[in-house]
Every structure is written in structure tokens, then in C-alpha cells.
């Protein structure tokens, strides 16, 4: 599942994931509320794209719903100082300027 409030970025992430053999996007959400609403899709991975510090509550909320092991968090430049805080709710934290192959290998 992809969770990103910006449609263009969400579409780009979906295209990237679809390009990987054996991977598919089963659901997309713009907000944490939207992501919780599609929990019946039972995604193996919840990919959350954070643009700012204000979005950290979303990680906490979704980790409670989906479990820490399913979470992958992409940090934008405004949230790059928070990997430790976010790391409590996700085992996999990447900066948005990482190589695309790094995301696939999470």
C-alpha cells in the first residue's frame, strides 16, 4: 500500500513499484484515515511518504493498525532529522534521495 498526500508523487511511487517483478500496489491512500479504511486489503508492506515533521503522527497511527514490521517510511528533507523517532514505529526508514533499488531491497 502507498500512503502519500500528493497525487503526482503517489503515482510515481506506484509506477516504480509496478516496474518490479513480483510486486504490486494493492491500495493507495492520501491520509492515515484513508489507509486505515482499506486495511481489509491486507498489504504486505505499507509504504509511507513523509513530507514534513507534522506527518509523524501518521506513522504512529498506521504502525498500530498494520504492525511495525510492515512499515517502510520515506523521509522528505523537512523530516530528515527524525529517523530515530520514526524508527520506533518502522524498521525501515529511507531518505527520499536514496537510490530506487534501495527501496526495493527493504
Image (cartoon, rainbow, N blue to C red):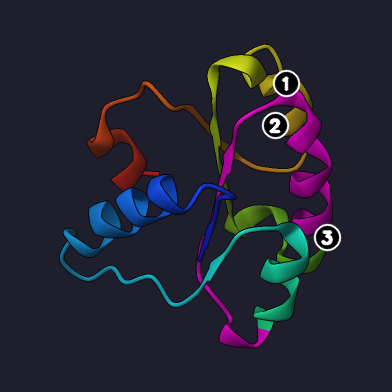
* Residue toward you, 50 or 70: 50
Mark 3 and mark 2: Cα distance apart in space: 14 Å
83 falls in the magenta region:
no
The numbered mark at residue 101 is: none
| Disc 1 crowd, CA 10 A, few/some/many (<14, 14-19, 20+) | few
Answer above or below: position of 106 versus 26: above
Answer above or below: position of 50 versus 6: above
Residue 15: image location, x then y, percent = 25, 57
The numbered mark at residue 64 is: 3
49 falls in the magenta region:
yes
Residue at point 58%, 81% (across, down): 42
Residue 59: image location, x then y, percent = 74, 46
Residue at point 75%, 25% (across, down): 53
Tag 1 secondary structure: helix
| Disc 2 crowd, CA 10 A, few/some/many (<14, 14-19, 20+) | some
Which of the 4 image quarters holds residue 88?
A: top right
State the extent of the magenta-drawn residues as a range: 40-63
Q: Earlier in the sequence, mark 3 or mark 2?
A: 3
- Check if mark 2's residue and mark 1's residue have beta carbons within 8 Å: yes
The numbered mark at residue 87 is: 2
41 left or right of 63?
left
The numbered mark at residue 84 is: 1
Amino acid at each position: 500500500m502507498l500512503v502519500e498526500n500528493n497525487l503526482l508523487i503517489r503515482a510515481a511511487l506506484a509506477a516504480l513499484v509496478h516496474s518490479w517483478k513480483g510486486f504490486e500496489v494493492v491500495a493507495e491512500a492520501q491520509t492515515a484515515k484513508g489507509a486505515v479504511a482499506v486495511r481489509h486489503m491486507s498489504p504486505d508492506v505499507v509504504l509511507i511518504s513523509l513530507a514534513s515533521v507534522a506527518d509523524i503522527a501518521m506513522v504512529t497511527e498506521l504502525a498500530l493498525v498494520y504492525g511495525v514490521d510492515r512499515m517502510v517510511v520515506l523521509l522528505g528533507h523537512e523530516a530528515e532529522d527524525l529517523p530515530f523517532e520514526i524508527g520506533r514505529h518502522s524498521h525501515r526508514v529511507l531518505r527520499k534521495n536514496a537510490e530506487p533499488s534501495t527501496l526495493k531491497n527493504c
